[in-house]
Amino acid sequence: MSPTPFPFRSSSARAILALAAASLVFGGCATAPGAPGAQGGVTSSQPATDAAKVAAAVAAGVTAGNAASARPGASPASVAQAVGAAAAAATGPRPFADVIKDAKESPGLFHVWQKDDKVWLEIAPEQFGKPYLFTANLSRGIGEQGVYGGMMLVDQIVEFKRFGSTVQLIAKNHAFTAGNNAALAQGVREGFTDSLVGATTVASQPHPERKTVLVDANALLLTDIPVGQRFTMGVHMRNYAFDAKNSSFEAVRSSPDQTSFDVSAHYFNPKATLPPPPTPTPPPPSPFPPFTKLPDGRSLFLGYTYNLATLPEPMAVRRADPRVGHFDVEIWDFSTDTRHTPRTHYVARWRLEKKDPAAALSEPKEPIVFWIDRTVPERYRATVKAGILEWNKAFERIGFKDAIVVRQQEANAPFETYDARHSTVRWFVATDAGFAIGPSTVDPRTGEILQAQVAIPESWTRGDRTFITEQAPGATADGFAELPDGRDYRCTFANEALAEMQFGLDVLAARGELEPGTPEADAFVDAALKAVIMHEVGHTLGLRHNFRASTVFPLAKIADPDFSRTNGISGSVMDYNPLNIAVNGEQQGAYVEPSLGPYDYWAIEYAYRPLPPETENEELAKIAARGGTDPLLAFSSDQESLAGHDPDASPFDQGSDPRR
């Protein structure tokens, strides 16, 4: 790939090609019909004319001095090959119709053309410099050590930029702004940079009517875009290198609002099966042991789904408050110097607007839609749906009817939920995974949640419920670092809840209170799964962990069956709540959190309650202030829990006196 129309670096090389081309025309390799001395080949005038054009094109950039220094003597075949390449570069890209001849078209946001192993992306003039959402998902993993299929990877706002014959895909930096302050806006442009996602070349002349151009999608997307991202970092830490030659497009799809590419990405490590060299002192154990689930340790394929999608117009932001636990986006706003810091934080939340703003209870203009992925076993789909829809109770309290809608993806559905338009709950299959995860795609300009995913390990479908404790002890999500925008997705609740459930089943079976395999045992499992779904869906709605919520009720209350089944056993489903198993012989309350807690209603109210713009900040301050007076709204973040200074801010404690 070269940004200039002439690919040869040295002027002497250009001179050699010019002289060679001239010799082809004038030195006997191309002569007029019937001319004496024609040696071996050209017997018509048309090739001579073409060769003359080639010579003229090549010679156009050659100076007399360079020509004088050229060395003749190259073989006719090599000269012809070089001349052909030079002619192609000199005359520019091929006509649009020639490039896509016999190619299959997929019309949509970006028209995609595919022929054999080649894919071209058609870009209109107005699509350069326009923001789009770019996401990447891991559609196929290797089933161990953090590389799990079904996970979200990258989400960025990108733009296509063209200069000369090069087209770049640029990740835009929206973390810094100066608003309408022109002087500081210039400073922001000079002070911070965007990033390059990928680059390719213009492959065609403009379309005669549409004025669009084709670009080489192979060069753009058959690259290692997700390098270093979650779930793929472990591949690179084991010295697997991306292998473009054996990577390919498996499918391309395009609709009016998004274009998707399914990529099979090959990685190769020729040393993977070699034993380490002997050393006098054995090295310490590696945090990245070899992969063991590959048929050949030297090679692996990962599946990526790349999506380019339209972006909505930026919605109104809502200021975050540290007294309420929301994920947020951090923006450095240099537009004024009246604040002590330019850093501002906006709540991560869905765009939710009433159809009828005057109604006390109204359906939203656009509901939050969750799809139950076809990977979820039928046995658990009703429980998953119930866990998702439980959050509608909090939205109803602030005036939204059916804010969340659940749909089922059928087995033969023509779409994949790896795209940028389907929020989903999915099952993933691995040999050592013991976590659930609830990430979301957030507009970095405003905090708007655009898409979300809940991923649950397949271990929930094990008949004997002992998968985690027996086959994958200690499996955690410790490898998932906090993302740059502050959204911390380290969530081991599914792992811990499954271990708690197994313990509870064993205890209740030993007491004779619950017979394994009975409808009562299944109901116990369903209740535990519903609690996990509520917790992870809470993350996708923008809520962080709350490790103080379990302390709001006294033990006597949560042991009361009537109280606990009505009010729950904790102040929030966003805590890590243990099983509530009564001492043998005492009354038994609800085993797990059956519904949302008071904190959950409060956090949803702060993020989603419709407020007049002119009084929004004042109203938000009033809502947040309730946390200082109402003990049922107690909140502590992950950071407070990890610091270890407060025994009340801990996972898996229970009751208002956890030291008992």
Image (spheres, rainbow, N blue to C red):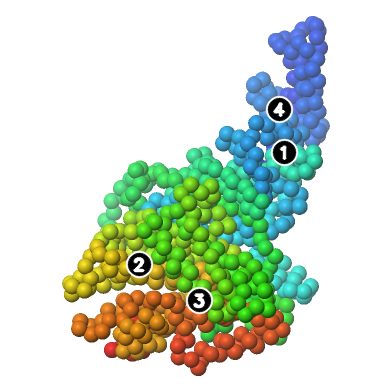
Q: CA distance from mark 2 to mark 1?
A: 57 Å
Pinpoint residue 116: horizontal percent, then vertical percent: 57, 34
Which residue, given by chain and number where applicable, does mark 2 sit on? 526
Q: Amino acid at mark 1?
A: Ser
Q: Nearer the viewer, mark 1 or mark 3?
A: 3
Q: CA distance from mark 3 to mark 4?
A: 73 Å
Label 2's element? helix
Q: Nearer the viewer, mark 3 or mark 4?
A: 3
Q: Earlier in the sequence, mark 3 or mark 4?
A: 4
- For image coordinates 66% across by 71% down, the residue present is 355
Query: Dividing the image into 4 quarters, which one contains the N terminus?
Result: top right
The reply to whether discs 2 and 4 touch (Cβ–Cβ < 8 Å) is no
Query: Dividing the image into 4 quarters, which one contains the C terminus?
Result: bottom left
On the picture, is 402 further left or further right than 55? left
Which residue, given by chain and number where applicable, does mark 3 sit on? 393
- For image coordinates 48% across by 82% down, the residue present is 599
Residue 289's place in the image compared with 185, above or below, is above
Label 1's element? loop
Which residue, given by chain and number where applicable, does mark 4 sit on? 83
Q: Nearer the viewer, mark 1 or mark 4?
A: 1
Q: Earlier in the sequence, mark 2 or mark 3?
A: 3
The answer to whether any part of residue 416 appears in the image is: yes
Label 3's element? helix
Q: Amino acid at mark 4?
A: Val
Pinpoint residue 589: horizontal percent, then vertical percent: 31, 81
* Res. 204 mark: 1
Q: Earlier in the sequence, mark 2 or mark 4?
A: 4
